Amino acid sequence: MGNRLPPIVGNWYTHRDKGAMFQVVALDEDAGTVEIQEFDGGLDELDLDEWRSLAVDRAEQPEDWGGPLDDLEPDEFGYTDMAGEDKAGSPLEAAITTWEQIVEDDDFDEPIH
């Protein structure tokens, strides 16, 4: 059975037969190709006919969307380690630096030479 989903760059999909997730990372309509990256990091280029023959469904971006990106630090995902933080607080609240914290951390007492 064919696929009627359009390949949209940035969208995640899952193979119905394998269950493996992948993301469309490039689309060249002039050349008729779709480049996908499997969650484990493998890259593949398909022509549009191959894309249409795939049995895929749309998928939500995985929580750990950086699976293939081994060299990224956790704070590069847009969240930080919340250990010791109030679990009810949002990651955004934990990542915000207030002006009070900046002033507290700044050394205004040192003379300027």
Image (spheres, helix red, strand yellow):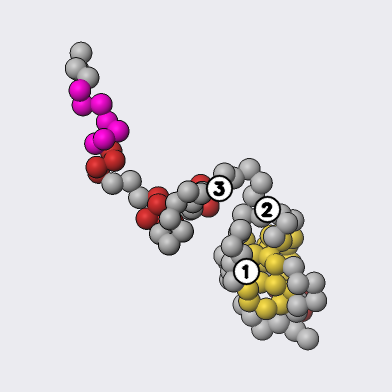
Q: Distance between the Cα atoms at labels 1 and 3?
A: 21 Å
Residue at which label 2 appears: 68
Question: Viewer-nearest of labels 1 and 3?
Answer: 3
Where residue 4 appears, x then y in whole percent? 66, 83
Residue at which label 3 appears: 74
The question of residue 105 being in magenta is answered with yes
Instruction: Tell me which corner region of the image, top left, top right, bottom left or bottom right, holds residue 52.
Output: bottom right
Q: Amino acid at mark 2?
A: Pro
**Residue pictured at 64% horizontal, 49% vertical:** 69
Residue at far top of view: 113
Where residue 22 appears, x then y in whole percent? 68, 65
Tell me the magenta residue range: 103-109
SS for callout 2? loop
Q: Distance between the Cα atoms at labels 1 and 2?
A: 14 Å
Q: Amino acid at mark 1?
A: Trp
Vertical arrangement, residue 31 with respect to residue 77, above or below: below
Is residue 4 shown to the viewer in this render?
A: yes
Is residue 29 shown to the viewer in this render?
A: no
SS for callout 3? helix
Vertical arrangement, residue 75 with respect to residue 52, above or below: above
Query: Quadrant of the image for the C terminus?
Result: top left
Vertical arrangement, residue 9 with respect to residue 58, above or below: above
Pick whichever of labels 1 and 3 is earlier in the sequence: 1
How packed is label 2: few (under 14 Cα within 10 Å), some, or many (20 or more)? some
The question of residue 31 being in magenta is answered with no
Choose between 96 and 24: the one closer to the eye: 96
Residue at which label 1 appears: 12
Residue at far bottom of view: 1
Instruction: Tell me which corner region of the image, top left, top right, bottom left or bottom right, holds residue 19.
Output: bottom right
